[in-house]
Image (spheres, rainbow, N blue to C red):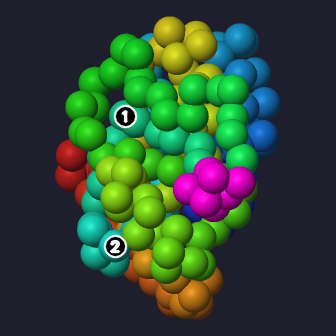
């Protein structure tokens, strides 16, 4: 099953599961309970912390949920904040950070790179966590729309339309 966030990130070949961590967890859990898929592939856009360029396609099976305060030692978490797909077909080591917030801070971006985190996407941590709970193989395919800096929102908006076309074409050519 191919899933996406929805909203302005809808694909004719993907089922929307929600925007952000909470909506994805709720909606993907409903899908898994009532019509458990054999495989979940999440498709979406991402911001690059700096190692990937605009319109790069990135595959991943590893997600993290880290906020700015974590790198500044202003918080801690009792959860496992980095998870890998337990039963996956995509073996990329690119780590995708998920948060309900979009990064616009260069320092945070540099901290992410230092910790091996390549891109951010709001939903992927919830996708992987939910798939692992139901023992479903999972992976993600992302297209970079922006860098995680003060221009993130404007760059995302400027690049989104082309990114959607590019990732759709990529997926159709790599079935």
The mark found on residue 61 in the picture is 1
* Residue position marked by numbered label 2 in the rendering: 50
Where is residue 172 drawn, in percent x and y? 29, 51
Where is residue 171 drawn, in percent x and y? 31, 51
Task: Check disc 1 and report its element: helix, strand or loop.
Answer: loop
Q: Is residue 100 left or right of residue 127?
A: right
Q: Is residue 4 visible?
A: no
> What range is drawn magenta here?
68-74
Q: Determine whether 100 is above or below 21 in the image.
A: below
The Cα atoms of the two marked residues, 2 and 1, are separated by 19 Å
Please name whichever residue, 85 or 10, is drawn nearer the observer in this view of the structure.
85
Nearer the observer: mark 2 or 1; the answer is 2
Q: Is residue 2 left or right of residue 30?
A: left
Task: Check disc 2 and report its element: helix, strand or loop.
Answer: loop
Badge 1 crowding class, 10 Å Cα cut-off, few under 14, some 14 to 19, many 20 or more, is many
- 70 inside magenta stretch: yes
- 108 inside magenta stretch: no
Please name whichever residue, 30 or 25, is drawn nearer the observer in this view of the structure.
25
């Amino acid at each position: 099953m191919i899933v996406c966030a929805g909203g302005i990130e809808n694909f004719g070949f993907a089922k929307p599961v929600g925007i952000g961590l909470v909506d994805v967890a709720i909606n993907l859990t409903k899908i898994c309970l009532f019509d458990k898929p054999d495989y979940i592939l999440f498709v979406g856009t991402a911001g690059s912390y700096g190692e990937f360029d605009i319109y790069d396609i990135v595959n991943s099976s590893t997600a993290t949920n880290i906020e700015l305060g974590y790198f500044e030692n202003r918080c801690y978490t009792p959860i496992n904040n980095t998870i890998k797909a337990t039963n996956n077909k995509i073996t990329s080591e690119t780590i995708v950070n998920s948060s309900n917030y979009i990064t616009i801070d260069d320092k945070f971006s540099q901290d992410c790179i230092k910790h091996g985190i390549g891109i951010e996407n709001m939903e992927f941590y919830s996708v992987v966590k939910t798939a692992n709970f139901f023992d479903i193989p999972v992976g993600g395919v992302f297209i970079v729309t922006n860098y995680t800096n003060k221009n993130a929102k404007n760059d995302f908006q400027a690049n989104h339309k082309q990114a959607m076309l590019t990732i759709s074409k990529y997926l159709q050519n790599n079935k």
